[in-house]
Image (cartoon, rainbow, N blue to C red):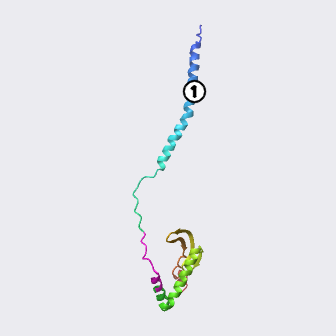
Amino acid sequence: MARRKKSTTKSTTAKTTTKAASTATAATMSTAPKTVLTTAAKAAAAATTPTPGVVAAAKPVIAAPMMKKKDLMDRVVERSGMKKKDVKPAVEAALAVIGEALAAGEEMNIQPLGKIMVNREKDRPNGKVIICKVRQPKPPLAAQPSPVVDAAE
């Protein structure tokens, strides 16, 4: 019974091939996750990209006509029932005081007008621009009969 011995050249070649394969596998493994992450990142970015669609046009804000000092006085006369010659000095004095307070940067709480706060001021060659924030309280809800009161009657 003769047994054949394995040749050393085969095992040396096999070892060399194994080393080369393991080196190639290690190199592929180190770069493979980066490629997979990059591909996954691109897929995630593509999934989160919004789809284009039709956007409705914004409705333009239409401002009411500008109220002038004469219009204000006419409304005050109508609401108070006083004569125009008596109302004019009071309205002009009130407007002057409000204008001076705004120019000084004061906060005002004038009800029912609301709370007036100066946000920014900018000097211009022809005057001063004052940006204000006016916070008005919500109007009270109309008194509605309570269903509990109706049931009790």
Quarter in which the C terminus is drawn:
bottom right
> Magenta stretch: dominant SS?
loop
Residue 105 included in the magenta stretch of the image: no
* Residue at mark 1: 23
Residue occupying image coordinates x 41% and y 53%: 52
State whether residue 81 is above or below residue 59.
below
Residue 101 visible? The answer is yes
Q: Amino acid at mark 1?
A: Thr
The one nearer the camera, 26 or 95, is 95
- Image quadrant assignment for residue 113: bottom right
Placement of the N terminus among the 4 image quadrants: top right
| Image x and y of residue 115, in percent | 57, 75
Q: Name the quadrant containing residue 33.
A: top right
Closer to us: 135 or 98? 98
- Which is nearer the eye, 116 or 106? 106
Q: Is residue 16 above or below residue 60?
A: above
Q: Secondary structure at mark 1?
A: helix
Could you say which is closer to the camera, residue 89 or residue 27?
A: 89
Q: Is residue 111 visible?
A: no
Question: Which span of residues is magenta-colored?
Answer: 61-73
Horizontal side, residue 117 vs residue 49: left or right = right
- Identify the residue at horizontal 57%, vertical 26% (top origin): 23
